[in-house]
Image (tube, rainbow, N blue to C red):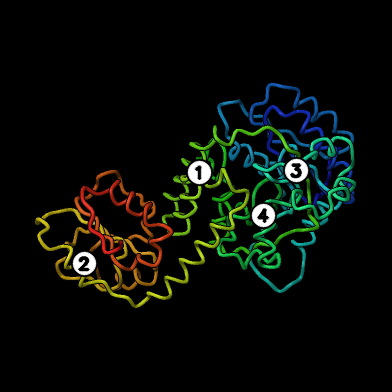
Amino acid sequence: MRSTSPRASVVIPTYNRAEELRATLASLAEQRLPADEFEVIVADDGSSDSTAEVVRSFEPRLALRYFFQEDRGARVATARNAGARMAEAPVLISLDTGTIAGPGFLQGHLALHTAQDGEAGPRVVIGYTYGYRPFDPTPGLAEAVAALPPEAVRRRYGEDPSFQDCRHPEFASVDFDADALPLPWIMPWTVNMSVAAVDFWRVGGFDETFEGWGVEDLDLGLRLYKAGARFRVGREAWAIETPHERDPAGNADGVTHNALHLLKKFPEPAVELNWAWFATGEWLVQDNSAALHARYASLLDWTDEVAALGVSHEIDTMLRDVPAGSRVAVFGCGGSLPRSLPVTATLFDFDARVLAGVAAGNSLHRVHHALGVRTCLPDQSVDLVIVTSRLRGVWEQHGKQILAEAHRIGGAVRSRCP
């Protein structure tokens, strides 16, 4: 069965989860959208079970395409891109294996992509996913999904908080207007999301240098955000994620590595805080990122508060008795620099406007838009790190991390924060 002009292409990456894939494909075969208006692409990352046979069994019911790549470790970004290259529809929908689409799932996604609301530019739809609670699974949900159709499962649990998408608190805090969140780009996860194919490829698709588990979807979200994307929560594009065994602790090192990879691509305060979320293990104990949004909002408020705060005098004071030729870095450099600051100094500030002013002043210094929680400098690459009072408003929340980073990159640290 082949759709000749599909409106949507659903890309499902998979690896050795044949029975979970069967349930996902069965839910797509029961969509209200006619089967000749969408296609399904299974992107297999090297399965050795009966995945291919399961796909073939649905060929009479779905317009299916199947891609297989050799198992060389987790390469889900590569698999997702391969599936997207096979797609023929103008809208790409990502759905995880084991996620059960509600009967109006496809219509819900398409409705938000075709809505005439006067907003130009890319649009990302974040599908609401019931039961997506990786560290706090809904009691009895796996059994309910196995026994009942999706609509009956949703009726059974109703508004039970244990059944809500783990992102529900963030969505509800802004009346489900994801654009109103401080960090909207961290919200669209590939468990259930969609974007126009042209916009997906305009930003380069998934970055295939992300390997292992996690962060490739945040990277895509950030690039779409920088391209002007608007983010919409698709409550009608709902699905149910079936609880399954996970190994979050086993993935911790890999996801932290990928978060650092994202930071090296986009060295800026928001991505620093995202890295810290993973590096500190906070993501392992909280099912949502509400605290991360709050921290970034607080940083933005502080940035406005100290926009005009100069710290030239205190930098000059902390440079006294520093040997000539010393390698110096300054966290919170501000917009005015003392003459005593070596031209070889590396400068960091969390206010991009301040750094633009420094650059416009024909400064020869290397400047970086960063808070100082995690920079991209190598270990012990400078002799002295100066931490100015511009950081005092974030010190209670981030001071320990900033000091740890200063000691990582510097032989000595001088600080005006407690």
Residue for point 25% across, 45% down: 380
Q: Amino acid at mark 4?
A: Arg
Which of the pair 398/87 is nearer the observer?
Answer: 398
Q: Amino acid at mark 2?
A: Ile
- Which circle's residue, 4 or 3, is located before the other in the chain? 3
Q: Amino acid at mark 3?
A: Thr
- Which circle's residue, 1 or 4, is located before the other in the chain? 4
Provide the residue designation for mark 3: 138
* Structural distance between the alpha carbons of marks 1 and 4: 18 Å
* Structural distance between the alpha carbons of marks 2 and 3: 54 Å
- Which circle's residue, 2 or 3, is located before the other in the chain? 3
Provide the residue designation for mark 4: 167
Residue for point 69% across, 33% down: 14
* Left or right of 8 in this view: 190: left
Q: Is residue 175 above or below residue 31?
A: below
Which of the pair 101/362 is nearer the observer?
Answer: 101
Q: What is the secondary structure assignment of the residue under circle 1?
A: loop
Residue for point 58% across, 36% down: 248
Quadrant of the image containing the C terminus: bottom left
* Structural distance between the alpha carbons of marks 3 and 1: 22 Å
Q: What is the secondary structure assignment of the residue under circle 4?
A: loop
Provide the residue designation for mark 1: 281
Task: Say whether marks 4 and 2 touch (CB < 8 Å).
Answer: no
Quarter of the view holding residue 137: top right
Q: What is the secondary structure assignment of the residue under circle 3?
A: loop
Q: What label sits on residue 315 in the rendered view?
A: 2
How many numbered discs, if any? 4
* Structural distance between the alpha carbons of marks 4 and 3: 14 Å
* Left or right of 60 in this view: 175: left
* Structural distance between the alpha carbons of marks 1 and 2: 34 Å
- How crowded pointer 4 is (Cα within 10 Å; few <14, some 14-19, many 20+) is rated as some
